Image (cartoon, rainbow, N blue to C red):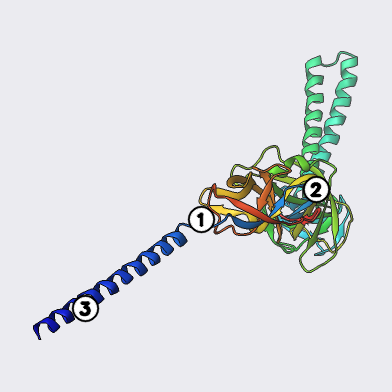
Amino acid sequence: MKLISNNIFLSLIFLACIISCKSKSGATKTTQTTQQGGGRQQGPQKVEAIIVTPQKLDQSIEVPGTLTASESTEIHPEVSGRLTMLNVREGVYVSAGSVIAKLYDADLQAQLKKLQAQLNIANQTANRLSQLLNIQGISRQDYDLAVLNANNIRADIDIVRTTISRTVVRAPFSGKLGLKGVSVGAYVTPQSVIAVIKKTSDMKLDFSIPEKYIHDAKNGTIVFFHVEGSDVRHSARIMATESGISEDTRNLMVRATVVDNDPTLIPGAFAKVILDFAPDYTAILVPSQCIIPQARGKKVIAYKNGIAKFTDVTTGVRDSANVQILSGLNAGDTIITTGLMSVKPDSKIVIKNIVKTRQSVESFKQ
């Protein structure tokens, strides 16, 4: 019995050894397989790309503007007094020199008559003294004093006449009158505004443009605009620019004269000004999705000898599909358009497809 028990014990030990060897062998194979699979290197990432080529860029910008009258001023009386006549028909056109208002001048007219009477007496006195001087009946000094008195009276008459003329308020130029600010019988002073007159026959258009476009805003350049509530496209010709760029906005103020005298255009109206610049046939354009925004600037991924190179770029105008590149890329460079989020700097990439780009882009807007 003891011999049988020993044989059973040895058999169990032998069986356990066999199972243990098989388990180690399976684990070893599994480990080798795992190591072989984990050590296998994946191939370069496949991406799509475009080749940068010069393209035609017809660019235009739209900026706000304001219509202004070629001439505009407030009409003030030159002297103080009571209004006796007011010839202001609101909203009508008047000619230069037309009488707008008349102030009370009866006292000045009476003073003028008094001086004229004094002048007649002074002239008669001077004539009599002249005859006496010829026969040496008086001294030369007496005659000179009489002539001086007559001349002084003439000067006083000229002053009064000038004052009377200043009681008449006339239109300084031909234009359209606005709303009157006074009524007949009111006492007015040189600070009182009788009405405002604007010359609307030759309208002006004021607008400002960004600093980088100032070389395109030359005198004689035609710009187009339209006003709110109207689809009519008007034109204007640039006549002058401000002497310097605004330090606050970095914009240049431009003034243009409206070509057509449309009576519907009103001074002070808001205008949308459209400036069309000469086409750029060497513009570098890339799809918008190629641009990678950064905290400081923007980048694109260029393909160079199978390596992904992150390149800094400066962008210009854009539309819904493309962005202009001002610096950072040259014609002939290859940039990738897909896989931008997964491609790492200096990683290996393979181009699976070259995407064609359109040859012209029109109506880019600031």
Instruction: Give the farthest residue toward the left.
Output: 2
Pointer 2 residue: 277
Q: Amino acid at mark 1?
A: Gln
Q: Amino acid at mark 3?
A: Ser
In depth, the one of 200 and 355 nearer the eye is 355
Q: On the picture, is 126 further left or further right than 68?
A: right
Quadrant that contains the N terminus:
bottom left
Quadrant that contains the C terminus:
bottom right
Up/down of 365 relative to 210, above or below: below
Pointer 1 residue: 41
Name which of mark 1 and mark 2 comes first in the sequence: 1
Q: On the picture, is 289 further left or further right than 194?
A: left
Mark pair 2, 3: CA separation: 99 Å
Name which of mark 2 and mark 3 comes first in the sequence: 3
Q: Amino acid at mark 2?
A: Phe
Residue depicted at x 80% and y 48%: 277
Q: Depth-wise, is mark 1 or mark 2 nearer the camera?
A: 1
Q: Depth-wise, is mark 3 or mark 1 nearer the camera?
A: 3
Pointer 3 residue: 11
Which secondary structure lies at badge 1? loop
